[in-house]
Amino acid sequence: MSRIGRLPIELPKGVEVNIQGAKVTVKGPKGELTREFRPEVLVAIDDGHLVVTRTSEVGPVRALHGLTRALLANMVHGVAEGFRKSLEIEGLGYRASVQGSELSLQVGHSHPVKYLAPNGITFEVEKGDRIIHVNGIDNEVVGQTAAEIRGIRPPEPYKGKGIRYLGEKIRRKAGKAGKAAA
């Protein structure tokens, strides 16, 4: 058995699960998520827990077992508590602001870069316009949105300026002067 796939998923209070064949809908206080899974993997509710089982021991089906359980756990966590990714802006004059559902970034371009939030995503900016929080209930969309924002101005290795994940370490390179002295 898959170590991850065999673990039951506990359903917190206020979270409802509706299973219709291979389609699973999870409702909670933060919202609702729906996903269709492969028919080789079965999802059932057993005593307040979600249980994932597989129909055969073939390699691809065994791989789907753990994947399905992880995706379901993310759905349950998302509708109950939500997900958050934090980004940090580094650089002189670099800043961010939020107007409605649009994130405006001034990160060294000749114009402010506007990023429109996808459905279900909200932005928060704090700490002197230097930290951006991406919030949502779908883990995939939150991670993809954070990666796209980071891609607008990735951190460069010489001065470290750009947008990075909060706590991300950037390997710094020595410039021309550093190479000449060595």
Image (spheres, rainbow, N blue to C red):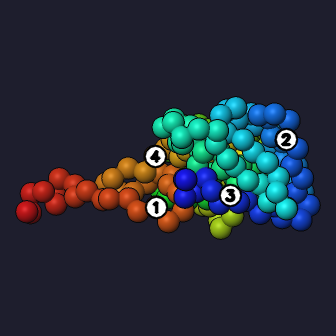
Closer to the observer: label 4 or label 3? 3
Dot 3: element: strand
Mark 4 or 1, nearer chain start? 4
> Dividing the image into 4 quarters, which one contains the C terminus?
bottom left
Q: Residues within 10 Å of mark 2 (few under 14, many from 20)?
A: some
Instruction: Kindly identify which residue carries mark 4.
Output: 154
Tell me the amino acid under the disc marked 1.
Glu
Residue 19 bears which disc, if any? 2
Closer to the observer: label 2 or label 4? 2
Mark 1 or 2, nearer chain start? 2
Q: Residues within 10 Å of mark 4 (few under 14, many from 20)?
A: some
Tell me the amino acid under the disc marked 4.
Pro
Closer to the observer: label 3 or label 1? 3
Image location (x, y in percent) of residue 157: 33, 53
- Whole-number angstrom distance, CA of label 4 to CA of label 1: 12 Å
Instruction: Kindly identify which residue carries mark 3.
Output: 84
The residue at the point 73 percent across, 59 percent down is 9
Dot 1: element: loop
Q: Is residue 127 above or below residue 102?
A: below
Instruction: Kindly identify which residue carries mark 1.
Output: 168
